[in-house]
Image (cartoon, rainbow, N blue to C red):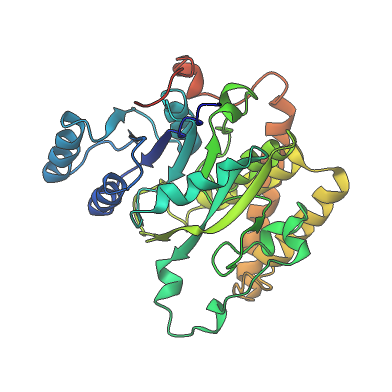
Amino acid sequence: MESPAQPLSVSLIVPTYGREEPLCDTLTDAIAQDYPHLEILVVDQSAQHRPEVQAQLDRLAADGKIHLHRVPWASLPGARNYAARRATGDILIFVDDDVRMEPGFVAAHVRNYADRAIGAVAGRVFDRMKLTQSCTQDLEEFDYMPPEALDPAIAWYHLDLVRARQPQPTLTARGCNMSFRREIFQNYGIWFDERYRGSAVREESDFCLRIRKTGLKIWYDPEAHLVHLGEETGGCHDVSTRSMAYQVTFYHNHFWLGLKNLTPIQCLRFFAKLFDCHVLGHPPCYKSGSPLKIAVRGVFYVLAFTKAIGTAIAAPWDDGQIYSRRDRRPIREGTIA
């Protein structure tokens, strides 16, 4: 008689930057999870916390409820990689530092991995900002996302991990609620690309596109849901969204995603949609149609494209893993007791 399979162990990873009470609330929900084989890793990139918040973090670490790691830099993909090298779980779940989770959140992610073909799970994300909107028309649920949501050239404008209510394949996950088999890192050598700077927009999309090349599936499960608070400060908001640096980085990350992962034809379609939506402001972006603002966004678009070309030219000898190069710790073996 075959012995029953060992239950999968889980590492719940919370990168944090400049967050206070929302981080504490997130950790309260993490500790309250009803899944027994769980460790919680916090990668703290904050320069400092308020005394009462720091005291709470230190207390949780001293009590063994979290593994607290402090690093002297701020990079969301860098923090994810740092935690992955220290995680012992079979499954790595990544959440933001401003989310609220129900006790069954971890278990909802894990049950999908009974299917060995699934390498990643995208959870449902209820954005607080959308939940509190007076107009609920845009929140009408549907069963399945359109076929365009699986087209890597335009999927980013058709993916909806908020309103879809049926489990289904997906092209990518949202960074605030996603999980992966540890073997993605350990056996396939896929890591988060630290060249995604600023808000790190599209870093999770890049990661998921590379997973798809292994033949493993990315699966959307609406039962693995959380509420994303979307705090205006902290998190990966290390530059003002109105600053030139933020805007150029935003477009650069999109261009780099395309140049790195898409075919030339897909790139043309992707970059055209990026221009139509984010520069001209057409739906689903709904940005101002002011000629001045369009011109300014166009300048950012061109500057960012030039910068992305530079990133691509340097790629053969510079993989951009500047934070990982500072930390050559190998991925840990073993599981959680």
Tell me where residue 120 appears, x and y as whole percent.
59, 42
Q: Vertically, is 78 above or below 266?
A: above
Q: Nearer the viewer, residue 112 or 326?
A: 112
**Which residue is the extreme one toward the front?**
1
Tell me where residue 196 appears, x and y as whole percent.
57, 39
Quadrant (top left, top right, bottom left, bottom right) of the C terminus: top left
Quadrant in which residue 283 is drawn: bottom right
Mark count: 0
303 relative to 130 in the view: left or right:
right
Quadrant (top left, top right, bottom left, bottom right) of the N terminus: top right
Tell me where residue 236 appears, x and y as whole percent.
42, 46
Q: Nearer the viewer, residue 112 or 288?
A: 112
Quadrant in which residue 305 is drawn: top right
Q: Is residue 127 visible in this depiction of the protein? A: yes
Q: Nearer the viewer, residue 122 or 207?
A: 122
Residue at 88% over, 49% down: 265
Q: Nearer the viewer, residue 44 or 107?
A: 107
Q: Vertically, is 129 above or below 90?
A: below
Residue at 31% over, 28% down: 69
Residue at 39% over, 39% down: 12
Q: Is residue 199 visible in this depiction of the protein? A: no
Q: Vertically, is 186 above or below 114?
A: above
Quadrant in which residue 169 is drawn: bottom right
**Which residue is the extreme one toward the right?**
265
Tell me where residue 276 appears, x and y as whole percent.
73, 66
